Image (cartoon, rainbow, N blue to C red):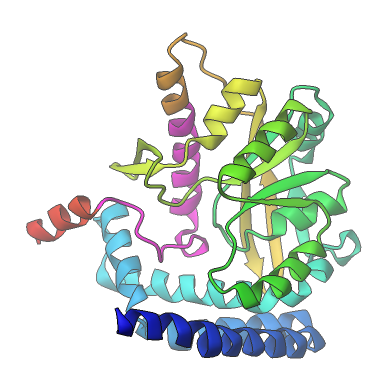
Amino acid sequence: MADANFKKLFQKLVKHPVEAASLFIALGVFRLLPIDVSSNIGGWLGRTVGPRLSTSNRARRNLRLAFPEISSAEIERIVLGVWDNLGRVLFEYPHLDQITARESGRVELVGAEHVYAGAASERSAILAAGHLANWEVMAFVAAQHDVDLTIIVREPNNPYVQPAVDKLRGMSGGQRISKGTDGARQALQLLKRGGVLGILFDQKMSDGIPVSFFGHTAMTPAAPAQLGLRFKSDIIPIRTERLGPGRFRMTCFPPIEHPDSGNRKQDISDTMEQLNRLLEGWITEKPEDWLWLHRRWPKATYDAMEAKD
């Protein structure tokens, strides 16, 4: 108990403040650099440090589950690309307002008419996206194109970092609501008013629903389907691709079909199956764009894979 209390106190008084101070300094410094230089430094740091971290072993296991036919060399190439992308994401943060400015020409926008139609509809709209390329781009691009988008976000574990994160995200315009009970209530009110809600649906959620993902059952956030079916919202899949340092393509797809079998549980599952199939296709095309570093499948699935080796 004493050790646990000391750890909490150390985290509160030393670790978190030092992390926050380091972040503030880094953001200030990299804001002064040209966008491409900042992104390239982040990519280099990611490639240099990331593959050596134990977290990379999780990415390797995920890749073996998703793509059992690829070689170890290909897995290492993808892991390197994942860290390159993540490093760039972090060092592009101070520049997101410049990257996504319409006059910058750094974001190629495809299919914007689907979002415009959803935003104009009285039924509301849900933009369903994943942690692909730089996932923060979506909110900034929406604001640049006069779409009043509200995003559901997970707050950082370090409370001292929150002001910097809020400031950076606030540059985009739009609104953010935190995950949790209050956030869920706000999301319901927003869609009831006909608003536009952004949801990232690609990470493990313990209280989600079981849906196949790359051939293995994965607990999947059901919110896009649950909310979409409840409010008859347009569910618009959004894909962001990295084209280069600080350069992206954001593709807005036509709204997916709403199943209407009368069996709500099955309709929700079928809707999330549609979204997962789309996400699988995007990841297969550019696997290094996705965030492979979290545990996406149940422990038993990993154990079964390793038992076969």
Nearest the viewer among 285 and 148 is 148
Asked whether the viewer can see residue 253, the reply is no
The residue lying at 54 percent from left, 57 percent from top is: 131
Q: Quadrant of the C terminus?
A: bottom left
Q: Is residue 7 above or below residue 206?
A: below
Q: How far across and down, in percent of the image, does residue 65 sit?
A: 27, 55
Instruction: Spot the residue most to the right.
Output: 103
* Most common SS among magenta residues: helix
Q: Is residue 39 above or below residue 237?
A: below
Magenta stretch: residue 297 in it?
yes
Q: Is residue 40 left or right of residue 218?
A: right
The residue lying at 56 percent from left, 47 percent from top is: 180
Q: Is residue 81 left or right of residue 73?
A: right
Q: Quadrant of residue 302?
A: bottom left
The residue lying at 60 percent from left, 86 percent from top is: 17
Asked whether the viewer can see residue 191, the reply is yes
Q: How many marks?
A: 0
Instruction: Spot the residue most to the top.
Output: 262
Magenta stretch: residue 245 in it?
no
Q: Please report the bounds of the magenta region as a residue range.
A: 271-298
Q: How far across and down, in percent of the image, does residue 161 sit?
A: 64, 76
Q: How far across and down, in percent of the image, does residue 150 sit?
A: 73, 46
Q: How far across and down, in percent of the image, does residue 273 sit?
A: 43, 32
Nearest the viewer among 85 and 124 is 124
The residue lying at 46 percent from left, 17 percent from top is: 264
